[in-house]
Amino acid sequence: MKQITALIADDEPLLREHLRSNLARLWPELHIIDEARNGREAVEMFDIHQPDIVFLDVHMPGLNGIEAARSIARRAHIVFFTAYEQYAVQAFEQGALDYLVKPIIEARLADTITRLQQRLKQTTDTSPSYEALLDRMASDMRQRSPKTNYLQWIKASVGNSVRLIPVEQIAFLRSDDKYTLVAWEGGDALIRKSIRELSDELDPDRFAQTHRSVIVNLHYVSEVTRGMNETAELHIRGRPDVLPVSRSYLHLFRQM
Amino acid sequence: MKTAAPTTPRWPALPRPRQIVVVLIISVLIAWVTTPVFQSPFWLVLRRTTFISMVMLLAFTVSGTWRLLWLPRWIPHWLVRVAAVCLLAPFASLAAYVAIAGSFMNFIKANNLLSGFATSTIFALFFGPLVAVAAIKREDKQRERADRLQLELEKNALEREVLDARLRLLQAQIEPHFLFNTLANVQALVEAGSENAAPVLRHLIAYLRAAMPRLNDAEATLENEMQLVSAYLEIMHMRMPDRLQFELRLAPELKSLRFPAMAMLTLVENAVRHGIDPSTEGGRIEVGGKQDANNMVTLWVADTGIGMAETAVPGTGLTNVKARLQACFGKDARVDLHEQTPHGLRVELIFHPGAKV
C-alpha cells in the first residue's frame, strides 16, 4: 500500500513542530513530507510533493490558508486550523470541512485523524459547494481589512524623512511650479503629485477643486468673499492664505 | 478632530428688524427733544429725523460687512463704520430738505430751510456716531459671548473625547486570536518539555496583568509601559523567531515619566499586526524614547515591515493614542508618522512632559 503523505503549513514554527509530534504519536504511519511557513510556500510545496493531506493555518502572511486551499482545490484533503476565527469556524462547520482549533486538543485531533482515514478510502470527496464556500470565505477575509479608494495619507518629503500626512489635517493643496504645495497643520510640504491626479484621488466629500491650481479642504474654509467678474476668494481657518475660486467652480459656494 | 463647518460668507446685509425698531425709538426721542429748535411742527421733524437716521442705519449695517482691502490695516474697522455714518449724514439731511422744498433751487433760495439743514446735519453728526459707537460696543460684547460659548463647546468636546478614550480602554480586551495562538505555543513548549516554557508563561502573565481593563491609570509610568511592550514583544518573538527582531532603547531619565497606559503598546501591536505579520520576510521593531535639551520628549516605534498604503483607513487605535496623549500632555502633543526606507513605518509621539491640559 502506498504511504500516506501530508504537508503542514503554519507561520509559527513551534506550532508546526507541535502538530508534527502529535501526528507522529497518533498516526505513526503518516509521513510528513514537508513544512511550509506561509501560504505561497504551501502551494509551491504541494505542487512538488503532491501530498494526500494538507494541514493549513488560516492566518498566514502572503497568501492566507483559504487562498492556498483555493489553489490546491480538490487535489488533496485539507484540514484547516485556526486560533480564533469565529466566522471561519462557522463556515467550516456549514461546509462540513475538517478543521482544528488551536491550542490543539488531543481527542479532537484523534477524531480528525479517524475521519481523514475514512475519507482516504473513499474516492469521491467533499461537498459540491466546496469551491464556492472557499471563494466566499476568501472575499469575506479581504473585506475584513478596511480600505477605501480615496487617499487617507499624503506622503511628503520633509527634511530627510518622508512624512505621512493625514488628509484631514491638510488645509489646501496648490500647484507651485513643478510641485504641489501641501499646506497642513504641521507646516508646508512639497510633493510631486499634480493637482489633477490629487483631485481624482481625494475624497470629494471633504476636498473640492476651486481653481485650476487649487484643491481646498472644505472643513478649513472660514469665509468666502465675492470678487470681481464672477469669482470669489476663500479664507482659510488659521492661515493667512487667500485662495482663488474661478468662475467654473463658483457654484460650489453659491448656496452657502 | 476639528471639523468646523465653513461659515457662511457675509454679503452686504440689510438692517435687522430689531435695529430698525431701536433706531425708530431713538428718532422719536431726538425729534421730541429737538422740535423746539426748528420752526417745523413735531410730525414734520419726526419724519425728517426718521428718514435721516434710517439712511445712517443703512450706512452702518452695510459698512459692517465691507471688507475694504485697499484700506491700511492700522485703521480699525469700527472707525470705518462711524466714518461711513458721518459721511452719509449731510447727504441724508440734504435729501430731506430738498424733498421739503420741492426742488433744489427752491431749497437754495429759502434761508430758513438752509439754516434748518445746517442744524439738522449738526444734530445728525452729533447723535449718529454716538449711537453707532454704542451699537458697535454691543456687537463686540455679543461676539465675545459667542466666542466664549464656542470655546466652552470645544472644551466640552475635548473632555468627551477623553472620556470616550477611557471607555474604549475599559472595553479594550485582549485579542482572543493573540491569546489562543500564544497559549498554543505555550502548550507546544510544555509538551516538548522545553525550558523556554517558564519564561514565556511569565511574559504572558505580565502582559495579561497589564492589559486587564483598569479604571485608574494615574500611577502608570513609562517604565511600566516599556515592561508591557517588552513582554508583548518577547511573546511575539517566541512565536515568530525567524520573522521578528526587536530592540528597546529608552533613555533612563524617562523611566519615571507618567504616561497613559497602553499607548505605546497600541503602537507596537499595530507595528506587529500591520507591518511585520503580513510580511513573509518579517522585520525588526525598535521602540525608544529620548528627551532633548528643551525637555521635549520623543518616543518612537519604528518597524521595517510592509509599511502603510496611502489609502489605509486610520484605525481607532491611533486616534485613541493621540486623544489620550493630548489629554495627558496638552493640545501640543503630536503623533507623527514617517515612512522608513526601504520600507516600514515609524510612529513618533512628541510632547512636553511639563505641559498640562
Image: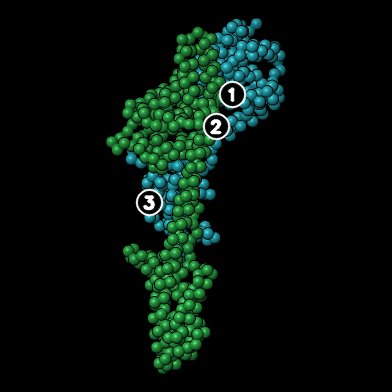
Chain colours: A cyan, B green
Q: Is residue B185 left or right of residue B67?
A: right
- Rendering coords of residue B143 (x, y %): 45, 59
Do the numbered discs 1 and 2 sit on residues whose CB atoms are within 8 Å?
no
**Secondary element at tag 1:** loop
At label 2, which amino acid type do we have? Gln
Crowdedness of circle 3 by 10 Å Cα count: few (<14), some, many (20+)?
some
| x 43%, y 49%: residue | A171
Q: Which mark is residue A176?
A: 3
Between B99 and A238, the residue placed more toward the observer is: B99
Between B46 and A106, the residue placed more toward the observer is: B46
| x 48%, y 53%: residue | B149
Q: Which mark is residue B171?
A: 2
**Secondary element at tag 3:** strand
Crowdedness of circle 1 by 10 Å Cα count: few (<14), some, many (20+)?
many
Question: In which chain is the residue bearing label 3?
Answer: A
Q: Looking at the picture, does residue B105 appear above or below residue B75?
A: below
Q: Which residue is mark 1?
A: A84
- Rendering coords of residue B117 (x, y %): 41, 85
Q: State the separation of the CA atoms marked 1 and 3.
A: 51 Å
Q: Which quarter shows the C terminus of chain B?
A: top left
Question: In which chain is the residue bearing label 2?
Answer: B
Q: Looking at the picture, does residue B33 appear above or below residue B333?
A: below
**Secondary element at tag 2:** helix
Question: In which chain is the residue bearing label 1?
Answer: A
| x 40%, y 73%: residue | B129
Tag nearer the camera, 1 or 2: 2
